[in-house]
Amino acid sequence: MERWDTLWDGGWTFCFDDGAFKPSTDSFLLGSFPPLRRGWRVCDLGSGTGLLGLLLLAREPSLTVTGLELSPAACALADRTAAANGLTDRLITLPCDLRDRRQLPSAGRFDLAVSNPPYFPAGGGETAGGRPRPPPARPAGAPGGPWGGGGGPPRARGGGRAWCTPPRRGAGRLW
């Protein structure tokens, strides 16, 4: 069921579905960790309903946050959140499969990458289309993680940073 909540009394609102996209503590924690600078362009990998991007914008309103999300349902919720808060020019969600480099924005476009990925056992869960989840693109322990040998997704500008919520450890810097 679709629901709405607020970040603070009288503040920005966000839309979620407690059946599939219920907010978790991880998003709120990660939203307070990365250092932010005025005017930065942020990429949220697997952005879901856009909550993490909204939290970052609450800390630094001059950001532009681009969410990349596989699920059309989550993209629609994120778009509703952006519209409800008058942020359609700064909280943008693009439907995208992160495993397909052809769908990704051009390299060097972002100053910061963040991610609060869902965690499923290998082969567990379902994709947005209800099909069985494929195996990970790369094993979790492989050098460079799921993105290959480059140490992270090739989206941040030189010297860019990335923050993620690793399982059971809280937020941390990827590189």
Image (cartoon, rainbow, N blue to C red):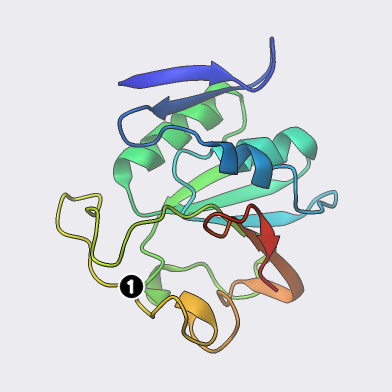
- Give above or below for 2 relative to 36: above
Q: Give how far across and how far down residue 137 sits, in percent.
A: 35, 77
Quadrant of residue 159 within the rendered picture: bottom right
Seen in the image, is 141 located left or right of residue 30? left
Task: Identify the image quadrant of the N terminus.
Answer: top left
Task: Identify the image quadrant of the C terminus.
Answer: bottom right
Residue 89 visible in the shown view: no
**Residue at the spot x=85%, y=52% of the render?**
37
* Residue of label 1: 136
**Residue at the spot x=63%, y=37% of the render?**
28
**Relative depth, front residue between 79 and 55:** 55
Most extreme residue toward the left is 131
Q: Give how far across and how far down residue 145 sits, in percent.
A: 51, 78
Most extreme residue toward the right is 38
**Relative depth, front residue between 16 and 144:** 144
Residue 58 visible in the shown view: yes
Q: Give how far across and how far down residue 23 sits, in percent.
A: 49, 33
Quadrant of residue 174 within the rendered picture: bottom right
Mark 1 surroundings: few (<14), some (14-19) or many (≥20) residues within 10 A: few
- Callout 1 secondary element: loop
Most extreme residue toward the top is 10
**Residue at the spot x=42%, y=52% of the render?**
118
- Give above or below for 131 relative to 160: above
Most extreme residue toward the front is 168
**Residue at the spot x=73%, y=33% of the render?**
58
Mark 1 residue type: Pro
Q: Give how far across and how far down residue 152 sits, in percent.
A: 58, 76
